[in-house]
Amino acid sequence: MNTRIRGASRRAGGRASSDPADESVDVRRRWRTTLAGVVVATMAMGGITALAASPAIADDAVAGDQSTVTAAESTTTTAPAGDPADPAAQEPAVPPADPPADPPAEEPASPPADTPADTPAQEPAAPAEAAAPPAEVAPAESPAEPAAKSAADVQLLLVPPGEEVVEKVEICHRTDSYKNPYVINEPNANGDVDGHATEHVGPVFYPEIPKHTEWGDIIPPFYYGDPADPSYFPGLNWDADGQAIYENDCAVPTEVPELMITPQSCVEGGPNGQLDFTLGPLQPNVDYRVTVWDSSDTLVAQFGWSGISGDVNGNAGLAPGDYTITVEQSIIADVWEQIDEQSFTIEECPPVMVIEVEAAATGCSLGDDGTALVSISGLVPGEEYSWLLSGDDYEASGVLDEVTSESLDVPFADLPPGNYFFYIRWQEGEEIIDAQATFFVEPCPPNIAVVVKECPAYGGEGGAVVKLSDLVEGLTYEVWVVDAHQNGVVYGDVKSVVGDATHMAEVDMSPLPAGKDYTAWVYAPWMPPGGISQWGDVNWFEVSASVDFSLKPCPAAPVTPVTPAGLAVTGTNDPGGLVTAALILLGLGGAALVGRGRRRAESRVTE
């Protein structure tokens, strides 16, 4: 801040008072030029905690320093006493014209205009300059000892207002911001007296000020009103702490927490990401909140802390998109100020590779001609996949290196009966994505037909030849014939046959009784090698077939002619027997004809 009071209107002539000579004004102005550098040194020595010093302790420290300076100067000159209510009385006295020559301590007695601006303690005018007109001082928190000394040093260097009447006054106007508690303002002098000085009358701000405390403006003392009869304003919060802030361009260093964010995409392989953040250090007398907004300005996450010191952490799960995170703090109830804002993006996850496999047999097997279809989905075009097909008595493997679509059907057509395990894998470094499926290829069921052999003659037997086809190579079949009506009574022996490369066989089941109905059966059990499959759950499978047939009865026995016992044996050349027979038949036939004619005649008469 350049000059504490601006727009001065110097009154013509001197005031009718006990004010010092006009040369003292020049002395004050020279002192102002050293204030900024001293304030910086003061804050470096005592730290910002000096702002917590109470006015009483600060005044004691000032008094101690002043007494020390006065004692050092007692060998040269003594400042005249003045009325504390009269600012002019506290201005430095004109130094004597003939100061002692020898002792080094007498050098500060020379006029300020003729001495360089060294340390404040070496200037004789410093103690008197520090005695500003009385001001209303708000109570402050307990100070630290170095802070009180620093504030006293600042107070020693500040000068009371001059004799001029001012129109505007440069002040430190309070805000509701913890980050920037004051701003420079230049209201009218009357406005200060009637407005700022009555509205914002709280204590001087300091970083540890209790939450929800309404701190006040910092206003230097000044003369205002009619130049012929000016009024005097003693200042507001014009203690050592207030003056230090005032001379530092109304700036109060406060610690602002730092926000560090770490956005992550595709957390744990899922489609969403996560934001991790750290905020700190926090002040226990300040409330904080962190908010996360999406690209449509919708609030998606919020965090808050009160009465916390140190660092805090937080995280939020977020869908892919653009986001903004803001940090706000509040020391005044319901008043929030934004202290940080950052943007970040949760990236879209790359396609999640999930391979799915479905497999099933599409045809039975006679030995090495079983068929199956493996359907694979979730493939990424351009990627390479290795596969393996293992069976009870089979193994094949390969690489899919020309994948052009997300799904693929892989047929197999050389499979023996049994259980199968299909496995496919994609690998990149240590990352492996795989899938598997099992299926079972059944042995084909046999076909059966019967060629009967009928009984050739009375008292003989029939037979049957069972013709088999679609036999599985290497599989052992059993063949038998049963009576179709007598509860499956087996006729003959159970015969065995082993399927070969022709997949056909004939079994003669003769002889069989003629004149019966039969059923011919063929049956075979299948088991994996070793009896237990290591690739699937099927450890036993049966195939069978049957057919009904019948045998006709054997031909009847031949008939032998028998001669009647009452007839004489005659030769073949005896005509007598033939004539006799003819006469008998002729007689009988005539009687029959006559009888039929009579019945018909009687019938007609009746009708």
Image (cartoon, rainbow, N blue to C red):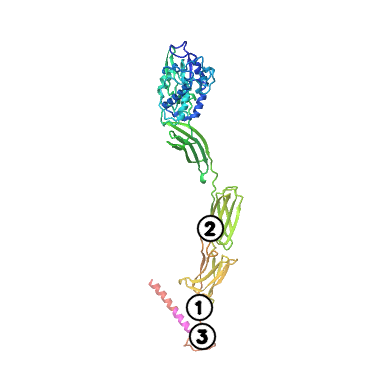
> Quick one: 117 or 465, which is closer to the camera?
117
Compute the Cα span from label 1 to label 2: 60 Å
Amino acid marked by disc 2 = Phe
Amino acid marked by disc 3 = Leu
Q: Residue 591 colored magenta? A: yes
Q: Residue 352 colored magenta? A: no
For the record, the magenta segment spans: 578-592
Q: Mark 3 points at which residue?
A: 578
Compute the Cα span from label 1 to label 3: 35 Å
Horizontal and vertical percent position of residue 312: 47, 39
Element marked by disc 2: strand
Horizontal and vertical percent position of residue 311: 47, 38
What mark, if any, has residue 556 been given in the picture?
Answer: 1
Badge 2: residue crowd in 10 Å (few <14, some 14–19, many ≥20): many
- In the image, residue 375 above or below residue 46: below
CB under 8 Å between discs 3 and 2: no
In which quadrant of the rendered view does residue 142 lie? Answer: top left
Amino acid marked by disc 1 = Ala
Precedes in sequence: disc 1 or disc 3: 1
Element marked by disc 3: helix
> Quick one: 22 or 218, which is closer to the camera?
22
> Quick one: 158 or 312, which is closer to the camera?
158
